[in-house]
Amino acid sequence: MPVALDESCRTVGDIRRIRELGAADAVVLKPMLTGLREALAMLSEASRGDLGTIVTTTFDAGVGTAMAIHLAALIPPPRPACGLATFDRLEHALSLAGTTPVAGTIRACGPGLGVSLDEAALARYAGPISGTVAR
């Protein structure tokens, strides 16, 4: 039975160690937890050792999900199913169209992340600002 490691993968060093030990068949990357730069390096490290890679969100709003979609698009074919269709778990994605799955597929749209923020939703869901902001 194939094994994927999820919460154990936060750094490139974690991926190296997993590869060295033969501890898993695949790893799960969550770019909102690691940051995009580290997630890209982790993807590269995993692919060097034929370690499968799955990209998921952490139930992110539109911008975070778009970032995860673009990262998943870098996985060499055949790509595994990734955990990116989580908007139905949120009250609002805070973004306009562009990251909704169609027939099980989500297309990365660009340039950039290809996401426009829903300004009305941002205003509706924004919490109070406390403290001071230095400029």
Image (spheres, rainbow, N blue to C red):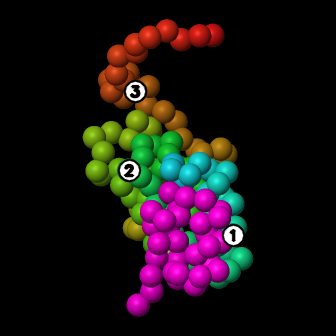
Q: Secondary structure at mark 1?
A: helix
Residue 103: quadrant of the picture: bottom left
Q: Which amino acid type is marked by label 1?
A: Glu
What's the CA distance linking mark 2 and mark 3?
A: 17 Å
The numbered mark, 2 or 1, whose residue comes first in the sequence reads 1
- Between the C-alphas of marks 3 and 1, the distance is 37 Å
Q: What's the magenta region?
A: 1-30
The location of residue 85, given as percent across then percent down, is 39, 58
The residue at which mark 1 appears reads as: 45
Residue 100 appears in the figure: no
- The residue beneath circle 3 is 122
Residue at image position (46%, 76%) is 4
Q: Earlier in the sequence, mark 2 or mark 3?
A: 2
Residue at figure coordinates x 38%, y 41% from the top left: 93
The 10 Å Cα crowd at callout 2, few under 14, some 14 to 19, many 20 or more, is: some
Q: Nearer the viewer, mark 2 or mark 1?
A: 1
Of residues 13 and 80, the one drawn nearer to the viewer in this rendering: 13
For badge 3, the amino acid type reads Leu
Expressed as whole percent of the image width and height from the top left, the position of residue 32 reads: 51, 48
Q: Secondary structure at mark 2?
A: loop
Mark 1 Cα shell of 10 Å, populated few (<14), some (14-19), many (≥20): some
Type of amino acid under label 2: Phe
Report if residue 124 lies within the magenta region: no
